[in-house]
């Protein structure tokens, strides 16, 4: 159901962004001074510490909460590949508090954002040029294998770009190829953040984002196609389910 934002929605979102950008600039300056001297794991903890504030502040200002199901499915040790649907800017903030540490596959342009992107670049992301698909796949497999060898989970949004609520989009096979190549499991994660923070939307709507973590898919004795299909079927089964009731407070 299409919702019409009220003046209160705009006021609450403005409060959120005022806090978001103010704290980000200060925290980024601190990280730029300290983080380069730290090993990767302590650096990740320092830099992503602000993400807990982002999620807390989003709840305070806009009433967006989070419910997570299936935390026990996240491997407690070893590397793995996470595949998740992409609906909102929200997941790029929350997932760094859920999978720790991690290496995110993202578009190169994000690293050019002042302060936010500068610090993000220190987390060893795999920054792809999406206009060069063949080169991007080679980069994903090479750099992804390197991160997995370091026991760093790799987060991939196989749809490639944000897909509106109610649509499924197309899933690429890069995650399955990376998992099979390195013999690590694939962990599928679904969320419905787009219902409360629509992609590229200034306004956020109150409600509870549902996050569901699926059972790991073991690539042993499976082809790339089989691993890909299992993850896609799991994600599509959740994406095609009826959306939650939407609040208009």
Image (tube, rainbow, N blue to C red):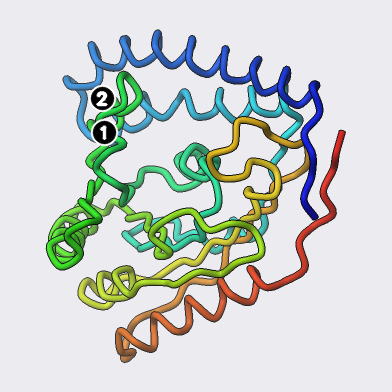
State the residue position of label 1.
111
In the image, residue 239 sits, relative to residue 113, either above or below, namely below
Q: Residue 101 placed where, x, y %?
A: 36, 43
| Contact flag, marks 2 and 1 (Cβ < 8 Å) | yes
Q: How many marks?
A: 2
Q: Residue drawn 76% across and 61% down?
A: 243
Q: Residue 89 placed where, x, y %?
A: 51, 41
In front: 3, or 54? 3
In the image, residue 155 sits, relative to residue 197, either above or below, namely below
Q: Residue drawn 20% across and 30% down?
A: 39
Q: Is residue 176 left or right of residue 51?
A: left
Q: Secondary structure at mark 2?
A: helix
Q: Residue drawn 54% across and 28% down?
A: 52
State the residue position of label 2.
118
Q: Residue drawn 31% across and 36% down?
A: 110
In front: 243, or 223? 243
Label 2, label 1: how far apart the Cα atoms are: 6 Å
Name the image quarter holding the C terminus.
Answer: top right
In the image, residue 234 sits, relative to residue 113, either above or below, namely below
Q: Secondary structure at mark 1?
A: helix
């Amino acid at each position: 159901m299409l919702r019409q934002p009220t003046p209160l929605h705009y006021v609450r979102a403005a409060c959120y962004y005022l806090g978001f950008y103010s704290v980000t600039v200060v925290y980024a300056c601190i990280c730029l001074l300290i983080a380069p001297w730290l090993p990767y794991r302590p650096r990740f903890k320092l830099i992503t510490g602000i993400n807990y504030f982002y999620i807390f502040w989003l709840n305070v200002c806009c009433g967006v909460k989070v419910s997570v199901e299936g935390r026990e499915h996240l491997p407690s040790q070893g590397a793995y590949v996470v595949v998740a649907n992409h609906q909102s800017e929200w997941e790029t903030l929350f997932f760094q508090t859920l999978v720790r540490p991690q290496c995110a596959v993202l578009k190169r342009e994000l690293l050019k954002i002042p302060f936010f992107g500068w610090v993000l670049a220190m987390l060893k992301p795999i920054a792809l040029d999406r206009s060069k698909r063949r080169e991007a796949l080679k980069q994903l497999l090479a750099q992804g294998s390197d991160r997995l060898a370091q026991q760093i989970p790799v987060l991939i949004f196989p749809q490639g770009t944000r897909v509106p609520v109610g649509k499924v989009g197309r899933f690429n096979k890069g995650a399955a190829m990376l998992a099979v190549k390195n013999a690590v499991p694939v962990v599928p994660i679904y969320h419905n953040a787009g219902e409360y923070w629509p992609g590229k939307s200034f306004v956020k709507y109150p409600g509870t984002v549902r996050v569901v973590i699926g059972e790991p898919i073991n690539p042993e004795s499976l082809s790339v196609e089989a691993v890909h299909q299992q993850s896609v079927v799991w994600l599509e089964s959740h994406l095609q389910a009826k959306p939650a009731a939407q609040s208009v407070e």
